[in-house]
Amino acid sequence: MKLKEIGDGIYMVDVVPLGYENLISCYILDFEKKAVVETGPKSSIQSVFSALREIGIKSLDYIFVSHIHLDHAGGAGTLAKEFGGKIVAHRKGAKHIINPKRLWKASVEFSRINELYGKPDSVGDRHVVMVDEDVTFNLGEVELKAFKTEGHAPHHLSFFLENERILFSGDSAGMCIDGSVIPTTPSPFNLDEWAESVERMIGLEAELIAYTHFGIYGAGDLLERVLNMAKRWAEIASESRTVEEFSERVKREDQELRRFADYYSHCDVMVKWIDYGFEGMFEFLARRGMR
Ligand SMILES: [Zn+2]
């Protein structure tokens, strides 16, 4: 576990899932109310426990999760049991936090990696706050807005710390490392909804983007760049006969993807995630009859 203070009362934790550094970050908000944004998978939840104890937080008020994928919320139930706190999730995903049995089965079928993340613990429904529309949570000195950013998943939320202008984007703004950003588009990806979500996030004029994969960056033109990349990838996919042809062409043409993939060439999990993204984009266009 690596803990870093990134602002007054705001911390980033590298939870080091499956022994990989710089892959999944979660964030801790230590104000009058205490919160965690993203938990990482269950298998690395002890990292979050250690970080909270190091900061001196004994109990939580909220656990905000962007979506139910195991690398983002797999540890939420276990964390709520140990530290308390309401789990805040999109209405469409909340039932899988309460009872993760079906999610677990589907996740393991989708990818064997998911098995390594550990089976999430269930929680009573009184521990879950379902988000339907924008809702702002008062954490004392600051406010955190939860809002829908569907597309990566049909039940995706992002969070905006209004005072500090920090956007916690989950997977809705792609993945970023060392300033190289790529879209993350696994099946059932929806490009139209996703692009709308990115436009919405551009409208927030965030100063910083706190990615789950991985770390925090000055917003600059990261959102515009990832939007243009995804649109270009969709063009390439629509001209390709197979997903292999599509991914080969993107790897040839897209320097930013190459930089990103080079950074993670040692990391099997990320290599697979990138491939799942190509498949998801390709399938989206096939569903739309666009290829
Ligand atoms: Zn993810």
Image (tube, rainbow, N blue to C red):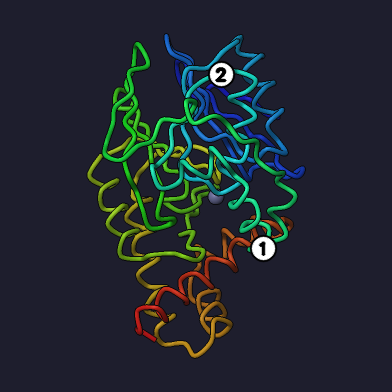
Which residue is nearer to you in this view: 199 or 260?
A: 199
Question: Disc 2 versus disc 1: distance between alpha carbons?
Answer: 31 Å
Q: Is residue 190 depicted above or below 245 in this figure?
A: above
Q: Residue sitting at 53 percent across and 39 percent down?
A: 97
Q: Are marks 2 and 1 in contact (CB under 8 Å)?
A: no
Q: Amino acid at mark 1?
A: Glu
Q: Which residue is mark 2?
A: 84
Residue occupying the point 75% across, 45% down: 18
Question: Within 10 angstroms of label 2, few (less than 14), some, or many (20 or more) residues?
Answer: some
Whole-percent x, y for residue 287 in the image:
40, 78
Residue 211 in the image: state x and y as whole percent.
Answer: 48, 42
Picture coordinates of residue 35 (x, y %)?
A: 48, 21
Q: Hey, which quadrant is residue 49 in on the image?
A: top right
Q: Secondary structure at mark 1?
A: helix
- Marks 2 and 1, the one that precedes in the sequence: 2
| Three-letter code, disc 2 | Gly
Q: Is residue 202 above or below residue 282?
A: above
The one of 117 and 166 positioned closer to us in this rendering: 117
Characterize the local packing of mark 1: few (<14), some (14-19) or many (20 or more) Cα atoms within 10 angstroms: few
- Residue 48 spot, x, y in % from top left: 64, 26
Check disc 2 and report its element: helix, strand or loop.
loop
Kindly give the residue lying farthest to the left in the view shown.
Answer: 203
**Residue labelled with disc 1:** 109
On-image quarter of the C terminus: bottom left
Q: Nearer the viewer, residue 222 or 286?
A: 286
Please identify the residue farthest to the bottom as the structure is shown: 241
- The quarter in which the N terminus is drawn is top right
Position of 42 compared to 193: left or right?
Answer: right
Compared to residue 81, the image places residue 56 above or below, namely: above
Q: Is residue 16 left or right of residue 206?
A: right
